Amino acid sequence: MDLVFRNPFRVLGLPLTATSKEIAKRVSDLETFAELGKAKSYPTDYSFFPGLVRTVEAIKGAARKIEQPEGRLFYSLFWFH
């Protein structure tokens, strides 16, 4: 279930159609919020899933996972469109 609960698109709060530029901006925004100890929520934070804590490490890890087209395709199979 980690492929869904810790999906990079969920961690970053992004749709599958996000561009590389949108991903980079979201990573920057989320890192800033995480460093300040503030939480940010997005429409993809579905309430029927377990809670999600966006730490700097989780944000960077999620970005790395969808950096390459192969990773992006793989994780898109386990997220909602």
Image (cartoon, rainbow, N blue to C red):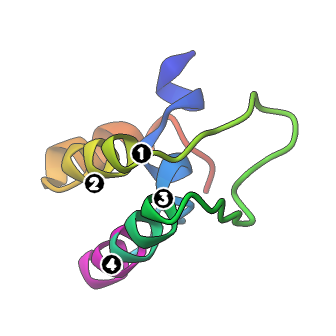
Which label belongs to residue 19? 4
Residue 3 x/y as whole percent: 47, 25
Classify mark 1: helix, strand or loop: helix
Mark 3 — residue? Answer: 34
Q: Earlier in the sequence, mark 1 or mark 3?
A: 1
- Image quarter of the N terminus: top right
| Circle nearer the viewer, 1 or 3 | 3
User: How many other residues sit within 10 Å of disc 2, few (<14), some (14-19) or many (≥20)?
Assistant: many
- Residue placed most toward the observer, 32 or 23: 32
| Circle nearer the viewer, 4 or 1 | 1
Q: CA distance from mark 2 to mark 3?
A: 15 Å
**What amino acid is at disc 3?**
Ala
Q: Which residues are magenta?
A: 20-27
Classify mark 4: helix, strand or loop: loop
Q: Earlier in the sequence, mark 2 or mark 3?
A: 3
Residue 54 x/y as whole percent: 52, 47
Report the residue at 51% width, 66% height from top.
Answer: 36
Mark 1 — residue? Answer: 8
> Pointers 1 and 2 in contact (CB under 8 A)?
yes
Q: CA distance from mark 4 to mark 1?
A: 14 Å
- Residue placed most toward the observer, 60 or 73: 60
Mark 2 — residue? Answer: 63
| Circle nearer the viewer, 4 or 2 | 2
Residue 51 x/y as whole percent: 73, 34
